[in-house]
Image (spheres, rainbow, N blue to C red):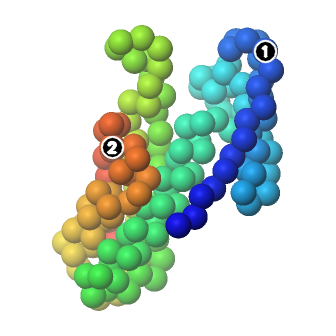
Amino acid sequence: MATRTARTAWNGTLQEGAGQVELTSSGSGTFDVSFPRRTADKAEGTSPEELIAAAHSSCYSMALSGEIAGAGGTPIALEVTADVTLAPDPVGGLHISLIHLTVRGEVEGLDAAGFEAAAQAAKVGCPVSKALAATTITLDASLA
């Protein structure tokens, strides 16, 4: 199976330093990161949490497409948003406290209950969901 690589070059302290994340495998880009921007209310540049959100929303979309087909439906369009929340960890430091997936789907061959069942199965079966299983993952799924 495939292995993908990203690389980060970091200089300086946590509060005053900065780094660059390079999506090495694909060559899709290099992005500036810093801790103050990571924890700011307004996003300016990317963060590990945004990259996790991107990974989760894209992986979940693929998993849901497969679940819909497996249930006898045809996915026409899926729009998936992943909201990843960074919060203080009760034992110290920070942690990802919640990931909320929102999906709106246009599907042929499944009713709302069938779509919900496929959406829940995809949440459990998505490889990124499995990797993030220590985090609470919630789901809001409905047909468009």
Against 91, is 53 above or below? below
Q: Is residue 25 left or right of residue 91?
A: right
Image quadrant where residue 27 sits: bottom right
Q: Amino acid at mark 2?
A: Ala
Q: Is residue 12 left or right of residue 102?
A: right
Visible residue check, residue 101: no
| Front position in the image: 8 or 135 | 8
Circle 2 sits on which residue?
133
* Secondary structure found at label 1: loop
Q: Is residue 96 left or right of residue 58?
A: left
Visible residue check, residue 46: yes
Q: CA distance from mark 2 to mark 1?
A: 32 Å
Against 18, is 68 above or below? below
Image quadrant where residue 31 sits: top right
Ranked by sequence position, the earlier of labels 2 and 1 is 1
Rate crowding at label 2 as few (under 14), some (14 to 19) or many (20 or more) other CA atoms within 10 Å.
few
Q: Is residue 11 left or right of residue 38?
A: right
Question: x%, y% of residue 100?
Answer: 39, 45
Circle 1 sits on which residue?
12
Quadrant where the C terminus sits is bottom left
Question: x%, y% of residue 91?
Answer: 36, 12
Q: Amino acid at mark 1?
A: Gly
